[in-house]
Image: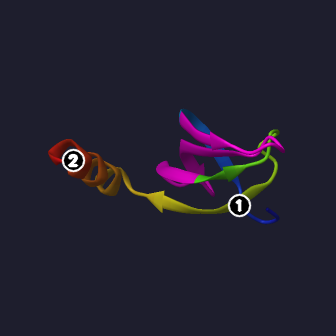
Amino acid sequence: MAGIKYEIIKHVAVLSETSSGWKKEVNLISWNDREPKYDIRDWSPDHEKMGKGVTLSPEEWNALQAHFREE
């Protein structure tokens, strides 16, 4: 994406993969040199293209994890 700088700090998980090689991934990403956030989105095999996704602060990520632990 033009104008957006990102660095994948930590790969957390692959949730699914399409026949074309795109993967829905959970990653810890620094967007535009900011503090890393957890991110869930589709990525092309070379990580040059991405789909729309959801970005969560560490606090939101922990709340989500806590929710699933309670079930």
Q: Residue furthest front?
A: 19
State yes or no: residue 21 in magenta. yes
Q: Nearer the viewer, residue 1 or 20?
A: 20
Residue carrying label 2: 66
Query: Is most of the magenta stretch helix, strand or loop?
Result: strand
Q: Nearer the viewer, residue 71 or 24?
A: 71
User: Where is residue 60, by image quadrant?
Assistant: bottom left
Q: CA distance from mark 1 to mark 2?
A: 27 Å
Q: Nearer the viewer, residue 38 or 9?
A: 38
User: Where is residue 46, by image quadrant?
Assistant: top right
Kindly identify the amino acid type of the residue bearing the numbered disc 1: Gly
Residue carrying label 1: 51
Q: Residue at x 74, y 45 (%)?
A: 18
Residue 38 bears which disc, if any? none
Percent x, y of residue 30: 57, 49
Label 2 packing within 10 angstroms: few (<14), some (14-19), many (20+): few
Percent x, y of residue 7: 65, 44
Kindly identify the amino acid type of the residue bearing the numbered disc 2: Ala
Please state if 38 lies on the left or on the right of 60 as rendered: right
Q: Residue at x 53, y 55 (%)?
A: 34
Q: Callout 2: helix, strand or loop?
A: helix
- Part of the protein shown in magenta: 13-40
Q: Quadrant of the N terminus?
A: bottom right
Q: Residue at x 35, y 51 (%)?
A: 61
Please state if 54 lies on the left or on the right of 58 as rendered: right
Q: Is residue 8 above or below residue 42?
A: above
